[in-house]
Amino acid sequence: MSVLPEVVGRDEFAALIIRTNYDDEAAWRAVVAEASRPWGTDGEFEALVHLVDDPTWAGVTPDAVLAAVRRDEELSVVFVADGATMQSAHHALLALNLPIEDEDLDPMYYQELIDSPPAREFRTTPAAVHDVHANLSLANLDFEDYAEAALADPEGVLRPV
């Protein structure tokens, strides 16, 4: 596999969506359209999205995505449009956790992480991306809160409230 390009020019307030599947252009356009709609209770917030639509990312694994975006210190979650996204009726993106690596944290905290590692991923509709991104960026909620909500859904997908 070639070296993945660095993601540049992302506004820290923009949700990052990386396309890794190129089998269905219409499905991708549907993802982009849904993720680009205003969001919030009454659509009061502008949808800020940074889309990576570069065939260099085709077939890239979640681990490779995480490794490639880890340099962005402002990023707490990345959304991936993979094969499952393109094949599902609700176009659920794969949300990947970028855990904080802070050397100043209490060693007891690290032991808790080892004993009970945080959730790594869950599926979310494009319409719920902004809520997830905003709340994780502000540390209002944890990734695990969203992962649990997704697991509670019959299809395992987080949907907007």
Image (spheres, helix red, strand yellow):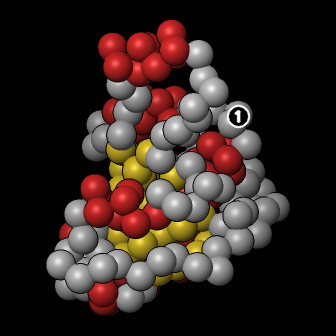
Figure quadrant of the C terminus: top right
Furthest residue to the top? 108
For the residue pair 49 and 45, the one nearer the viewer reads as 49
Residue that badge 1 annotates:
140
Q: Position of residue 1 (x, y in %)?
A: 18, 78
The residue at 72%/63% (across/down) is 13
Residue 137 to residue 39: above or below = above
The residue at 35%/69% (across/down) is 81
Q: Position of residue 115 (x, y in %)?
A: 33, 14
- Dividing the picture into quadrants, the one containing residue 39 is bottom right
Q: Position of residue 142 (x, y in %)?
A: 57, 32
Q: Position of residue 150 (x, y in %)?
A: 40, 38
For the residue pair 45 and 58, the one nearer the viewer reads as 58
Residue 87 to residue 9: above or below = above
Q: How many marks?
A: 1
The residue at 51%/76% (across/down) is 7
Q: Is residue 49 left or right of residue 55?
A: right
The residue at 35%/64% (across/down) is 65
